Amino acid sequence: METNGSDTNLRHTQSPAIRRRIILFPMPFQGHINPMLQLANILHTQGFEITIIHTEYNSPNHSNYPHFTFNSISDRLSEIENHLPMKANAEALYFVKYLNISCVDPFRGCLAGLLEKYGEGSIGCLITDAGFYFTQAVAESLKLPRMVLRTSSVSCVLAWGVLPFFPENNYFNLTKEDPNYESSAPEFPVIKFKDVAKMTTNPDGMRNYVTNMISHMKASSGLIWNTFKELEEPSLETIVQQFSVPSFALGPFHKYFPASSSSLIEQDKTVLQWLDTQSPKSVIYISFGSIAHITESEFQEIAHGLANSGFPFLWVVRPGIVSCSNWLESLPEKFLESVGDRGRIVKWAPQQEVLANPATGCFWTHCGWNSTLESICEGVPMICSPCFGDQPIDARYVSDVWKIGVYLEDGFDRVEIKMAIKRVMMDEEMRERINSFKEKVNSSLEEGGSSHQSLKRLVDYILSFCN
Ligand code: UDP
């Protein structure tokens, strides 16, 4: 098992006599699998036995977790094979809705089998991803408490809960000329009008997903968040008021256990040697996560922006990220020759180690929640290019609330990109602000810190189901 320094604060708190099993069920996407398996590891160190139920699609690598037991269930995704690999926006919502129907019977059968196998009273609770809202009814029918892991920020759930996802709404028919384009959304003023349409191209699907997710979160026995109090205190207070179930913010989970063992794509570790040859805080790291897609012209603007910036860069180009292209075919002519050793391009990187490397000076990110947290934990300021879902909300918090990054507000333009890079690389106050969050993360995980206390409360809460 891979661990890092923080796990020295984790001690087994249960005696073997009262060891209980927890069953966890992640959604089958990289940004959801990582935090769920990290949470499973955290709970294992607290003395719980761990069983993971997972879909066939994007199965985690069992051999990296010899201390867990795994149960794979049929997801019937082969019946919609032409929808794979999943693409962002409308298709992601279709995919999630489909799984919430196709997994019901296999999941119920698997869970009932596990209850029979281990015996009543030996299973403390079920923890599922919030996006698997169908599991609430299954858990209730089997009289098993269900807790929810929501893998986004707390603020995202609050924003989604009040934004009107209707296709006929102003937000989805907005042009740049509209006087409201730059204004704050009255329902959630941190968000601008122009951010809302970026969240989805399928407002009906989004409304359906958000309504189901939130109502089944409210019906659950408790909420677990991969965040920490010092980052999202006002939002956490609001969630406690609005959702009358206990909330536990014990993140960032990857500070207890890194995500490399749950990576679905092989990470190219050779980049770490290359980073070691670069000057401190000189390298731009670029990655847009596991699902986002960009167009060919956006890809080319990124390339020109990087070439013109003059800084060394490490660019993750996930195969298939560029629409209608396998990998690097769309790079501008002579791009590779012109940047030479100054640039490295890889298919997938050991992101947490890259961010922790002293050479990394800035992270140009799509603002997935895991990436945002990982950057905060290493004190690396961000350039934000959100694509869809919760990413525009995270970008707004990074740039306007926490002031630890620059938002490329209006897409990809080589001149804007060069300016944003320069600003993030040079702005010492921004770096100080993100370093102060980094220190707060570390304190929150120490004995007596907010996340450490939340973990203790969570363990006691789960044990209370067993009495
Ligand atoms: N990641 C990685 N290598 C990469 C890019 C990303 O290991 O080259 C990991 C990253 O550390 C994070 C996860 O993949 O834990 C991406 O999750 P996130 O929520 O940021 O974005 P998503 O993929 O869900 O859009």
Image (cartoon, rainbow, N blue to C red):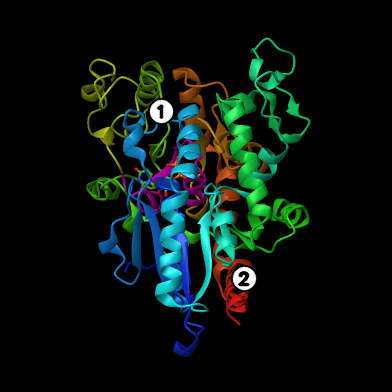
Q: Position of residue 299 (x, y in %)?
A: 37, 22
Q: Which mark is residue 293?
A: 1
The residue shown at (64%, 28%) is 196
Mark 2 vs 1: CB contact within 8 A: no
- Lateral position of residue 231 relative to residue 84, left or right: right
Ligand 1 image position (quadrant): top left
Quarter of the picture holding the C terminus? bottom right
On screen, residue 238 above or below 245:
above
Q: Position of residue 348 (x, y in %)?
A: 30, 42
User: From this viewpoint, is residue 226 visible?
Assistant: no
Q: Quadrant of residue 113?
A: bottom left
How many residues crowd mark 1 within 10 Å: few (<14), some (14–19), many (20+)?
Answer: many
- Sequence order check, earlier mark of 2 and 1: 1
Q: How crowded is mark 2: few (under 14 residues within 10 Å), some or many (20 or more)?
A: some
Q: What residue type is labelled 2?
A: Gly
Residue found at the far top of this picture: 177
Please state the extent of the stretch shown in magenta in the rendering: 349-375
Q: Which residue is located at x 34 percent, y 24 percent?
A: 322
Task: Name the disc covering residue 201, or none.
Answer: none
SS assignment at label 1: loop
Image spot of residue 399 (x, y percent): 61, 37
Q: What amino acid is labelled 1 in the image?
A: His
Number of numbered markers: 2
User: Is 344 rendered above or below residue 230?
Assistant: above
Asked whether the viewer can see residue 354, the reply is yes
Where does label 2 land, which residue? 449
Q: Is mark 2 on a helix, strand or loop?
A: loop
Q: Nearest the camera: 269 or 124?
A: 124
Q: Residue at x 74, y 24 (%)?
A: 183
